[in-house]
Image (tube, helix red, strand yellow):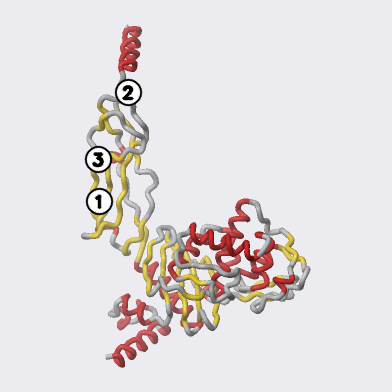
Amino acid sequence: MAIFRKLFVFILCLILSGCMMSECSFAEKVSVEDMLYAMPAREIIAVECNTGQVLFEKNSCEKTEISHLAKLMLVLLAAEKLKSGELSLTDTVTVSANANSMPAPQIWLDKNEKISAEELLKAITIGNANDAAVALAEHIFGSTDNAVTQMNRKAKLLDMKLTEYADVCGLDSRTVADAADTAKLASELVKYDILTDYFKTWIDRVRSGKAELVNLNRLVRTYKGISGMKACSSSAAGECSVVTASRGDMEVAVVVLGCTDRSMCDDIAQKLLDMSFDMYSLYTPEISEDMLDDIPVEGGEKNSVPVTFGELFPVAVPSGSSGSIDISFEKEDILTAPVEMGQICGKLICRNGTETIYTAQLVTNNAVKQKSFKFCLEKLLLYLIKI
């Protein structure tokens, strides 16, 4: 049985590298689970960034070394500083001896060299440069130790449970994460438009043209709608890729860790993006006007209260299923004062077959006090005055 399973996996790998699912009749008969199993990578995940929903995954919660992908957290912290105004792309950074001592990949920064923060950011996002990462971290946080502390703090805020940073470059074997955590990080990074051009750049130069940057993520040249993000490799981590792309309202982040071949790693990332966009779409229930009609209030200072669902966020559903989604709605006929603002007064439930795919609570949009003797007396006096 083991021989047959290995043969099956080998055939699937040939399919992945040689043809699209829609073009291969054999592939159409293969389950998604078998296809994911056949992909030669240690961890795989595809996540819809807007919703955080996992679309596909294989072994995505296993702690492993992540090599240069650690730099993505440093880039996120830099983007936050740029947004807040604490960092400017035109900032001049003085290169330290520590940054100068970093191993390849690098842009060969000299000790005491002056370079802009933007060039360092380019060198990190496009070229994985270790010396640039250390120089930028020291400029923003004063030291790499302080930078690592902030990187770990941010990881906790993003609920990246298995992520631990021991350095800013990903060279330390104690710098670890998993595919699921890395997808959360990618989903946060795509919110910063200022980074998109850097992540999508194929080739650039810094240091007055002396250092060339070449993006290892070849999908930036070929994949429609790509927005980033980073590819890297090391003996411990293997070939790794984080790729994000958008199509319509969907934004998808794919993480591939521990692949043995660069081309296969790219192919897996592309297939997962294709599968995500082909097999899923975003759905938000339509709200009819009567759902938002005011609800009468008994015994209150006001006769009715407005209601709202608040902001309705989309969910990813199988493509073509939106027409068959069953929507049920319940709403209180009348409320008794006192009524609190935000009080639950109804519920919307969307089902696809027997599966509940969406729930939203209807809540009051104002408070209504209970009638008091003083209120009733004032109303009576106003009525008498009008007469």
Name the front one of labels 3 and 2: 2
Q: Which residue is mark 1?
A: 327
Place of residue 331 in the rendered image (x, y in percent of width and height, measured from the top left): 25, 40
Q: Is residue 211 visible?
A: no
Q: Is residue 211 left or right of residue 263?
A: right
Please name the amino acid that badge 2 sits on: Glu
The residue carrying pointer 1 sits among few (fewer than 14), some (14 to 19) or many (20 or more) residues within 10 Å by Cα, namely some
The residue carrying pointer 2 sits among few (fewer than 14), some (14 to 19) or many (20 or more) residues within 10 Å by Cα, namely some
Look at the numbered disc 1 and give the secondary structure of its residue: strand
Disc 3 to disc 2: CB gap under 8 Å:
no
Residue drawn where x is 30% and y is 36% of the image: 293
Residue 281, numbered circle: none
Please name the amino acid that badge 3 sits on: Lys
Quarter-wise, where is residue 247 in the image?
Answer: bottom left
Q: CA distance from mark 3 to mark 2?
A: 21 Å
Quarter-wise, where is residue 63 in the image?
Answer: bottom left
Residue 301, numbered circle: 2
Name the front one of labels 2 and 1: 2
Which residue lies most toward the right here?
A: 112
Q: Quadrant of the N terminus?
A: bottom left
Residue drawn where x is 31% and y is 19% of the image: 372
Place of residue 36 in the rendered image (x, y in percent of width and height, measured from the top left): 36, 77
Residue 331, numbered circle: 3
Q: Is residue 373 left or right of residue 311?
A: left
Q: Is residue 157 visible?
A: yes
* Residue 93 in the image: above or below residue 383: below
Please name the amino acid that badge 1 sits on: Ile
- The numbered mark, 3 or 2, whose residue comes first in the sequence reads 2
